[in-house]
């Protein structure tokens, strides 16, 4: 993910997300009420670009297995949970290329990641030491970091929490310093690390939604606008995996200090939600909206970023919902990477045994009318389209 960094006052008590949401997309409800308007709604093209399956996409990369977190800098960085690697790409539709650099990530299956543009989070390795350029979370409770100054081919383990299952990672800047936030799905908590990778001791209520139903656990964490948002999925206590199903999910907002602000979205269109981003400014009907991607059914829904009202579901040119099996991350594109009107996606297709990386953008002439052929069919019941994670 792009650096989820804004300057947050540690005592912030109000939602401060900025940006203009189109007027037609401002009605609905947090429980799933859709927008009502006669204004034409943008259709979106879903364009697959990279897969580990030969012939599925123009570029084949055997390391792209269950790709999870995405971050954008000079190149596109992807954590691959299935191969334990990080792979890098440049370009976009018609120009996608893989860079030669591959990074091995120790400490279990890598999940979320962030770019670190600060001088903090220094790691030391066989080649020396320096501030991490990328930081990764893992399902085994490991936080690792990479800089070529320390090791040009391997990430370095920087922190470890026993019995934790880190599914997501965010980087936050406050008036008290820079911090990492890690979503621990196993223990339903947000762990906070300082600029030296030291885990902080938090108050009992920090980053806790007091209204959360039993067995819903923190699945991902993001800094969105001026608040910290946490996505919750239903966790099967027997398997430790997420449970798919329409209405199975919540998203809540917190201040930088972890104070609960409000419930942003409850149930409705949520289905094991994981990805949370603000849409690009040039994203058609849902420009500047809060986009929430479901791992459970692969759908992407747009919400008003301040009120949480449902604005609509992203749909393909053929009218069907965008539904990507095993959908994980979403990340805004850039002029150099995919385009400023694009959103990158990663997905663990075929029950997370394979991978897909692509972009979603307002449909243009010549773009495919349908999806990638990896449409999720999961809508209810235990597990998910990606096997549950």
Image (cartoon, rainbow, N blue to C red):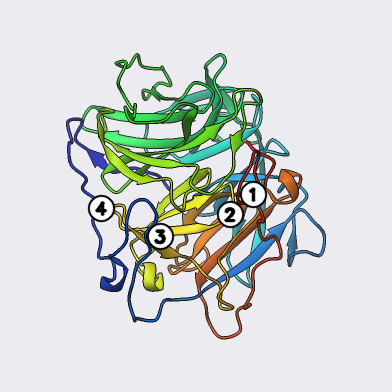
Which residue matches tag 2? 298
Q: Is residue 240 above or below residue 272?
A: above
Mark 2: secondary structure: loop
In this rendering, position of residue 265 left or right of residue 110:
left
Q: Are marks 2 and 4 in contact (CB under 8 Å)?
A: no
In this rendering, position of residue 85 left or right of residue 307:
right
Which residue matches tag 4? 306
Return the disc, 1 or 2, that comes first in the chain's sequence: 2
Q: Are marks 4 and 1 in contact (CB under 8 Å)?
A: no
Which residue matches tag 1? 326
Q: Residues within 10 Å of mark 4 (few under 14, many from 20)?
A: some
Q: Is residue 328 above or below residue 161?
A: below
Q: Are marks 3 and 1 in contact (CB under 8 Å)?
A: no
In this rendering, position of residue 154 left or right of residue 5:
right
Q: Residue furthest bottom?
A: 365
Q: CA distance from mark 1 to mark 2?
A: 6 Å
Mark 4: secondary structure: loop
Please state the horizontal and vertical placement of residue 365, each as a whole percent of the image: 56, 86
Return the disc, 3 or 1, that comes first in the chain's sequence: 3
Q: Nearer the viewer, residue 68 or 114?
A: 68
Q: Residues within 10 Å of mark 3 (few under 14, many from 20)?
A: many
Q: Nearer the viewer, residue 83 or 293?
A: 293
Which residue matches tag 3? 302
């Amino acid at each position: 993910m792009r650096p989820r960094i804004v300057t947050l006052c540690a005592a912030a008590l109000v939602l401060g997300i900025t940006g203009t949401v189109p007027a037609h997309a401002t009605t609905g409800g947090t429980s799933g009420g859709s927008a009502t308007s006669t204004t034409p709604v943008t259709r979106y093209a879903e364009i697959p670009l990279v897969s580990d399956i030969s012939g599925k996409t123009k570029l084949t990369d055997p390391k792209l297995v269950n790709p999870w977190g995405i971050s954008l800098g000079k190149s596109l960085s992807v954590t691959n949970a299935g191969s334990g690697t990080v792979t890098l790409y440049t370009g976009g539709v018609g120009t996608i290329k893989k860079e030669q650099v591959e990074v091995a990530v120790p400490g279990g299956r890598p999940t979320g990641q962030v770019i670190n543009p600060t001088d903090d989070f220094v790691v030391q390795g066989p080649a020396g030491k320096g501030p991490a350029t990328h930081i990764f979370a893992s399902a085994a409770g490991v936080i690792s970091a990479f800089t070529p100054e320390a090791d040009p081919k391997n990430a370095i383990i920087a922190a470890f929490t026993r019995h934790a299952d880190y599914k997501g990672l965010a980087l936050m800047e406050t008036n008290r310093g820079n911090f990492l936030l890690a979503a621990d799905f196993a223990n339903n908590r947000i762990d906070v690390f300082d600029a030296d990778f030291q885990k902080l001791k938090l108050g009992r209520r920090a980053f806790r939604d007091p209204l959360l139903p039993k067995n819903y656990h923190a699945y991902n964490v993001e800094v969105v606008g001026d608040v910290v948002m946490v996505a919750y999925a239903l966790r099967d206590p027997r398997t430790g995996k997420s449970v798919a199903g329409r209405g199975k999910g919540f998203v809540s907002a917190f201040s930088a200090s972890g104070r609960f602000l409000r419930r942003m979205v409850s149930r409705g269109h949520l289905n094991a939600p994981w990805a949370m981003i603000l849409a690009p400014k040039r994203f058609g009907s849902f420009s500047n909206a809060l986009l929430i991607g479901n791992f459970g059914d692969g759908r992407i829904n747009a919400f008003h970023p301040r009120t949480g009202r449902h604005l609509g579901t992203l749909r393909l040119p053929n009218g069907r919902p965008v539904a990507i099996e095993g959908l994980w991350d979403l990340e805004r594109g850039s002029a150099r990477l995919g385009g400023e009107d694009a959103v990158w996606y990663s997905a663990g297709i075929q029950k997370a045994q394979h991978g897909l990386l692509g972009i979603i953008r307002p449909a243009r002439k010549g773009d495919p009318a349908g999806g990638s052929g990896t449409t999720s069919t999961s809508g209810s019941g235990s597990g998910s389209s990606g096997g549950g994670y």
